[in-house]
Image: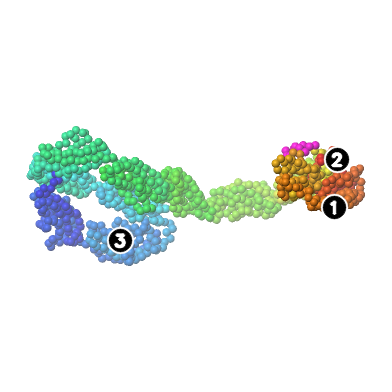
Amino acid sequence: MSTLCPVLQPPTLTKMPESLTAFSLDDVMLLCEATGIPTPSFRWVKDGKKLNWMGHNGSGNFTAHGDKPLSDYQGHYRCYADNTLGTAMTHTVKLITESTPTLPKQKRSHKTAEEGASVVLHCNPPRSSTIPHIHWMDKKLLHIGQSERVTTGLDGNLYFANVLKNDSRDDYTCNAQYISARTILPKEPISLTVTPSNDVARGRKPQLMQPQGPHSSHLALRGHSLVLECIPKGLPTPSVLWKHMDVNLSETGAWTDNHGRWLRFDSITQKADGEYECLASNTHGSVTHSYTVTVEAEPYWVKEPPSLLYSPGETVRLDCQAEGIPTPTVTWSINGEPVAEVDIDPRRRVTGGVLVLKDVVFGDTAVYQCEATNKHGNILKNTYIYVIELPAQILSSDGVVYQVTEGGVARLHCEAFGSPRPQDLQNTLLSDSRVSQLTNGTLELFNSSREDSGVYTCSITHSNISITAHLEVLKRTVMLIGPQAVEVTRGGDSWLDCHFTFDPHLNPPQILWRKDGQKIMESSLGDKYTLLGNGTLRVTDVQSADEGLYSCEVITDLDSVLASGSITVVACPSPPVFLSLSEEQDHNLTLSWTPGNTHNSPTTEFVVEVKEEKHPEGKWESHRVTGDVNHLELHLLPYSTYRFRVSGVNRLGRSDPSEISEAYSTLPTVPESYPLNVRSESTEPGTLVIMWEEIDRRLYNGSGFQYKVSWRQVQEHHWSHTHVPHPPYLVNGTRAFSSYEMKVQAINSLGEGPHPVPVIGHSGEDYPLASPSKISVSVDNSSAIVRWQPVDTHTVQGHLLGYKVREIKGGVERGTERKEERWVVEVDGNKTKEVVTGLKLYSLYELSMTTFNRKGEGPHSPTHPFRTPEGVPGPPASLDFESPSETELTLHWRPPTQPNGQLVGYVLQYQQSKAHAHAHKHTNKYTHTQRVPDNISTVVGERSVNLSWVPGDRYRNHSFHIKYLSKTVGGKWEESEQVNTLQAFYSLTGLQPGTQYRLLITHGNYTHWEDEIQTTGPELRGVEGDFATQGWFIGLISAVVLLLLLLLVLCFIKRSKGGKYAVKDKEESQMDSEARPIKDETFGEYSDGDEKRSVSQPSLCVESKLGSDDSLAEYGDSVDIQFNEDGSFIGQYSGRGPAPTGNESSGPASPVNLDPPPPPIGPSFAGILDRTS
């Protein structure tokens, strides 16, 4: 057999007719064209009868001819094409004829509907075998807006789920477009008037306008389209949810159209077979409709036999396999004649779709027809068998290079033809189990490896005819990392990998991504899909629509590799829908809902929120239920208005709340509770104030709510009552602190609530009538025990809260009138004694007591005076001192703030610190006492340096030496004569000009000051004479010395005029002014000898301090002083101001005059403090 084209060729159809509907003679056109050698002739058969029709110009197309009416052409047609080698025929087609659709006379219709009602505007287009396209338009030829509320149905009608006021118009026009008839038919406009209605607020439960009933069945043919319709009515506009009862809706190939009212299948497959449901719902309820979709199929080919050339003696097998639902029947024809009507030939055998013809001869050349038929249609295949005798030859090309990847199947073609049939020689290869040779001469090599690469030769036996083929086995393409199953949060981005390797000898492969089997087209940058350079697919802003199965296929010239993954979109749940409420029973209601989309993350719980709206304080209150429960029983309060909403929760968070339900009102009833905490808050005698906690407004349970207040005096039988809207209630005319029974009951317009238990209260309190009696006081130092006899309870006139102990302290202290001190101690009413503490010693007190209740205090008891005993005095209020010099102190102190009796004197003590370190041993701090100067200024001359300083305030009479070292070679430390701190100036002489010196002042082991200087003038050299020996220098020095001596004499004379220190004169004048004896102590004087000792080293600076009227006390510091056991101390002497004076009294103290005599102000005792010089 061969595809070689000889001089003659059987007929082959190139165009075949299709069934059609003709509205005019021009529409009649049935195609039928064929090729063949010789050129085929054509004939048509209608309804099994041959037509008197002749083709022209080699075409068999059938058109209307003659004067026949259009209706005569209606029927079933088949075309035949003949030549000398056989006859080919077409499948049967149907030609339908009908007149162009027209509209009958119509009356303009008018419709009226209430606002919120559903409306259907009917179109009713003319019937036709072709389905018209319906367009609802207005008089301006603009389309009527479509939405979930306004929808066009499959029947062409316009459906309003509910109408609004603005739907009123008079130009609703239905236009039916018949594409095949090239006609558009506009109907008469319809007028719609919408009237207002009060029922809009109530809403309407969903119902279906299309389809009717609870269930419908639909039959669809494979590859055809199908539309399921679900058009509801209701207020508010219901939403529609479609679902397949067994699988995910996306797996069926369906998608929603027409605002969710249609479920459309464009090319339906067997996967769409099954049960579907449409759920329409709003806040008032829901309605469902189920659909049974059955998918069947017209016959379609699974395997078709090819047309081939055969040589005599061969066996021919024609396989013709077709599928369909129901299973089609396959029949065979030869040259258009059924096999059953052809002469029986023992060489021919037909079994179902297989026809076998053995030992073919030239007469077997013909066109064979295989036709598959079921109730939905038929298909036909023309296949010719051409028996011919030709010389042996190889039809395949020589030197072809074949490429295959490892593991693949290599097919090396060697198609030979000849009569008789030539035999291919491939014996050496056929020994390999991986190698097989087909009947057409092709060599198949399975599971190819790199070692199979090479040159292959195909030759014909008993001839020198052969060809060669080159086989290259390349590396196969391998998927390294394919897309994975990933979870993506809604709104995020996802990356699907597609990493692979391929043989570099191949052209770059094509990377093909598919989603749910559909090819993904890469979008522009920043849009949904982006294919990266390494093959990775990036999906941006992932939403629920992006969820599905993704596959990456790498296609090379030789092989391909496929890997699949998926994207699962996870997100917070969608809000629940279809909230519904059961009937109320005993104020209990069950709220149910339909869970929203979980977005691939199971709902773990639902949050049910309830809000009471009749009262302004109403807030959303939450209740939680598990995720597998979609209802909740709620207890509602009577006479209340509620709204509800539900949210879903999963691991990613909480959904938005569902749409808020319509308001739900409960019926009123009598109050179910009574006020709590009923009590008396009476404050005024003669009144009873009844108080209680108000009931929550939500518990009123009805209109006309009030409180019924009842009261009666204890041991009375008759109740008094009244009705008030709120607390408190005041009862007048009662006695003071009388006991009453009280109760408060809740009532409304439907009746009284439960009866409460009465409580006891009292009318307003009055002041107590009596005070405690038999009061006694026992004093113990600064405390006292007070005892009394309690009052009679009848005199309290209220709740006895306790007693008040009032104390008053009076008297005169230190000769000044002191303010009275008062304080009150409150004591519990159950006590008959109390310990009063904190009393001051040596004081006079007065005590009285009162009884008190909530109203206040009663009368005071008689006053009870008592005294506290004398005690140890407190310390002096203050102690200060001054130190004029290092040898004297002056002390001042104030009397104690708490003398606690009559003062008889003071004890003064001090002690000398034995060692400086010992004096500080308890402070863990060593303080160095500065005795020599360290604030020294220097003026450098040629052979001397003048040092000046300010003496310290305290340590002014100390001796020290100045050490100096020449920094020349061989210099040694030298020391000045003894210098006193009081000098304030010293001139160090005998220095060398132009020489550097280091100066030090030390005391003990401590260096107080050091400096480096350089004398002026040129440095002395051995060759030069000492200028100090020159006459002019000697004269200058002599003049300076005489001037200094003169100044010292003047200074000495001025000091001699002072005599004694000024402080001594002040002491003596003070002694005279006081004019009182001070025992046997005498004041010490400063002698001239002391004065002279202090100025043993006179200087120009001393006059500013010692020659003034001020004493040495100006340089004293205040330091802490300890006294000797004999009580002697150093008095303070100061010329800064007169000593304070005061009155003295030596009279004895008495309890009546509690203030002791004032002590002498500023007493002076003389003593000498030893010090180290």
- Assign the N terminus to one quadrant of the image: top left
State which tag comes first along the sequence, 2 or 1: 1
* Magenta stretch, residue numbers: 914-926
Residue 916 visible from this viewpoint: yes
Q: Residue at x 59, y 51 (%)?
A: 694
Badges 2 and 1: C-beta atoms under 8 Å apart? no
Q: Is residue 872 left or right of residue 630?
A: right
Q: Is residue 142 left or right of residue 639?
A: left
Q: Residue at x 29, y 42 (%)?
A: 503
Where residue 1046 is drawn, which disc sits there? 1
Q: Residue at x 28, y 40 (%)?
A: 475
Q: Main secondary structure of the magenta part?
A: loop
Identify residue for label 2: 1127
State which tag comes first along the sequence, 1 or 3: 3
Q: Is residue 341 left or right of residue 890?
A: left
Residue 695 painted magenta = no
x, y percent for residue 798: 71, 48
Where residue 135 is drawn, which disc sits there? 3
Badges 3 and 2: C-beta atoms under 8 Å apart? no
- Assign the C terminus to one quadrant of the image: top right
For label 1, the SS is helix
For label 2, the SS is loop
Q: In this orientation, which residue lies closer to the viewer: 182 or 369? A: 369
x, y percent for residue 328: 20, 45
Residue 833 visible from this viewpoint: no
